[in-house]
Image (tube, rainbow, N blue to C red):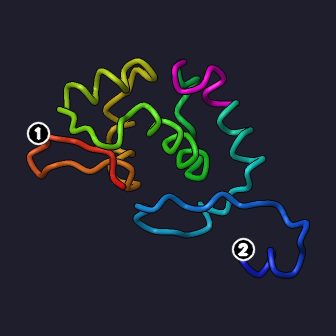
Amino acid sequence: MELLKERDQYAPAFVPPHNTATMVDDRYAVTEGEQQEIIHKFLPDGVNGRLKKFPPKEKQRLIVLRELTKLFNSNTTYTEKEINQILEKVHDDYVLIRRYLISYGFLERKPDGSQYWLKQ
């Protein structure tokens, strides 16, 4: 991606991976335009609306999950119940979304699952 930018000043702008990404690979090669299209497709009403469906492709998941992190305050510690209540407003399978937020490095939790927080 960096070579593309150096070779062509008109190359599309790529969205940088989030700071807490667990493994950066091709899934993170997303332009700003792609990101907006995917957000509009799966979250047409934004993060305050419902997720139309959970994205089938990992690249799409990353973008949607990143958008869903806007539902959380960065300096707040949440209980599992609070996390579930927030995510349930977005999608019925809030457990799946919570699991992905953790595995993709967006949320962190205590080993016993008693506290959750936005990873920074």
Tag shown at residue 114: 1
State the residue at coordinates (26%, 44%): 117
**Residue 42 vertical placement versus 34 (above, below):** above
Residue in front for this viewpoint, 30 or 100: 30
Q: Quadrant of residue 53?
A: top right
Q: Is residue 111 left or right of residue 71?
A: left
- Which span of residues is magenta-colored? 41-49
Callout 2 crowding tier (Cα within 10 Å): few <14, some 14–19, many ≥20: few
| Three-letter amino acid code of the residue under disc 1 | Ser
Cα distance, mark 2 to mark 1?
A: 39 Å
State the residue at coordinates (72%, 40%): 36
Q: Is residue 29 left or right of residue 95?
A: right
Tag shown at residue 79: none
Residue picked out by circle 2:
1
State the residue at coordinates (66%, 23%): 44
Task: Tell me if label 2 and label 1 are in contact, CB under 8 Å.
Answer: no
**Going from the N terminus, do you reach mark 2 or mark 1 first?**
2
| Three-letter amino acid code of the residue under disc 2 | Met
- Image quadrant holding the N terminus, namely bottom right
Query: What is the tally of numbered marks visible in this picture?
Result: 2
Q: Position of residue 38 (x, y in %)?
A: 68, 39
> Circle 2 sits in a helix, a strand or a loop, which is it?
loop
Callout 1 crowding tier (Cα within 10 Å): few <14, some 14–19, many ≥20: few
> Circle 1 sits in a helix, a strand or a loop, which is it?
loop
State the residue at coordinates (49%, 42%): 65
The reply to whether the magenta stretch includes residue 72 is: no
Magenta highlight: main SS: loop
Q: Is residue 62 left or right of residue 8?
A: left
